[in-house]
Amino acid sequence: MKNYENTTQERTNEKIEVLKIHVRADLYRAFRRCVWMTVYETGKSIVEIHNQMIEELLKNKGC
């Protein structure tokens, strides 16, 4: 199994943190599906996609 965190960390030399949130099961499945579709379409790592999604959320909320 590939270690996606180390792959991204090697590329960016940035420290990786774990963000744990609690959501409904349907939101979890939709999020995972969206992440995997984006990974497949872009070729980016899971961590890169997670970072991109969090950045977009924060920008949209004005944080």
Image: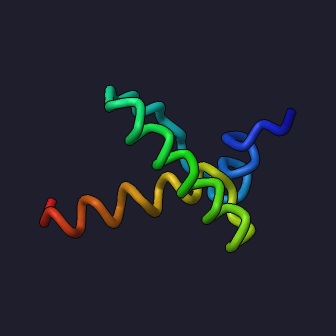
**Horizontal side of residue 35 vs 17, given as left or right:** right
Q: x and y percent of residue 6 in the render?
A: 72, 41
Viewer-proximal residue among 44 and 38: 38
Q: Quadrant of the N terminus?
A: top right
Location of residue 22 with respect to 61 vertically, above or below? above
Q: x and y percent of residue 58 in the render?
A: 24, 59
Q: Quadrant of the C terminus?
A: bottom left
Q: x and y percent of residue 40 in the render?
A: 73, 65
Name the residue: 64% across, 62% down.
Answer: 37
Name the residue: 23% across, 68% down.
Answer: 59
Residue sitting at the far front: 26
Residue sitting at the far right: 1
**Horizontal side of residue 15 vs 28, given as left or right:** right
Residue sitting at the far bottom: 42
Name the residue: 53% across, 40% down.
Answer: 16
Q: x and y percent of residue 55 in the render?
A: 35, 62
Viewer-proximal residue among 19 and 29: 29
